[in-house]
Image (cartoon, grey):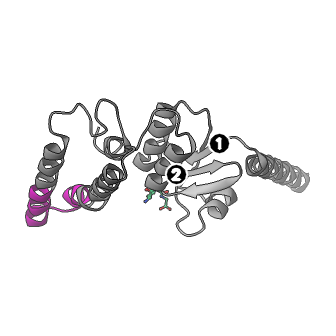
Amino acid sequence: MLFNLECGFKTKIFKFETDRSRNIKAKEEKIRRQKRCHSLDSWPSPFGMRVRIALDLKGIKYEYKEENLLEQKNPLLVESNPDYKKVPVLIHKGRPICESLIIIQYIHAIWKDRFPLMPSDPYQQAQARLWAEFVEKKLYDWGKMIWMNKGEEQEKATVEFIESLKLLEEKLGEKPSFGGETMGFLDVTLVSHYS
Ligand SMILES: N[C@@H](CCC(=O)N[C@@H](CS)C(=O)NCC(=O)O)C(=O)O
């Protein structure tokens, strides 16, 4: 009797798990086939936040798919970003675009007629990319070293972090944002980490 009850219970759990994974697979298959924009993201991710801000500024409708990064990664994420298996990934017309800064540039290029995120002048574009790289490689790394270290290392990182901020402040000048009157590529790169 007890054996039968246990077996029945296990069969139910098995059925529940199979149904659940079948539903997830069907949903992912739909995303692969659809023409709409999907964003694979995780709510605490500052990198994901960049993509959310860029899409919102452009007024693009998209479907948000929350990824649980603490569990085994979903096949769609692994398949879409096989090198890094990280969020964010934007899936547009069934094709995945990875890396937040590359995604923002893609969004700008595809929806050019709405809210420009990049300057039109190629020199200014190069400048925006240069400073975005500065935020990514210097500011972000010094910031990380502040909270990962203690003592001398932390003090050194704090000094460097402040120096980097001063350089950015100089670059900003009197403008309300790096993009000029409205937010641009560099603002989106920066605000997700330091707001
Ligand atoms: N350079 C990447 C960084 C993305 C990143 O680090 N994403 C984290 C979430 S904040 C992630 O997916 N981590 C999962 C993992 O490392 O397995 C970008 O700009 O998109």
Q: Is residue 177 left or right of residue 6?
A: left
Report which residue position mark 1 lands on.
37
**Residue 42 seen anywhere in this rendered image of the structure:** no
Q: Quick one: SS at disc 1? A: loop
Residue 153 in sight here: yes
Q: Position of residue 81 (x, y in %)?
A: 59, 62
Select label 2 or label 1 by which is in front.
Answer: 1
Examine the residues drawn in magenta and state their main secondary structure. Answer: helix
Q: Is residue 143 above or below residue 117?
A: below
Helix or strand or loop: what does disc 2 sit on? loop
Could you tell me residue 115's position as x and y percent?
A: 46, 32
Which amino acid type corresponds to the residue marked 1 in the rendered image?
Cys
**Residue at image point 8% right, 65% down:** 152
Q: Is residue 96 above or below residue 112?
A: below
Disc 2 Cβ-to-ligand 1 distance below 8 Å: yes
Within the magenta stretch, is there residue 155?
Answer: yes
The C terminus, quarter of image: top left
Q: Which residues are magenta?
A: 142-160
- Determine which residue is flagged by label 2: 88
- Determine the CA span between mark 2 and mark 1: 13 Å
Residue 38, image x and y in percent? 64, 44
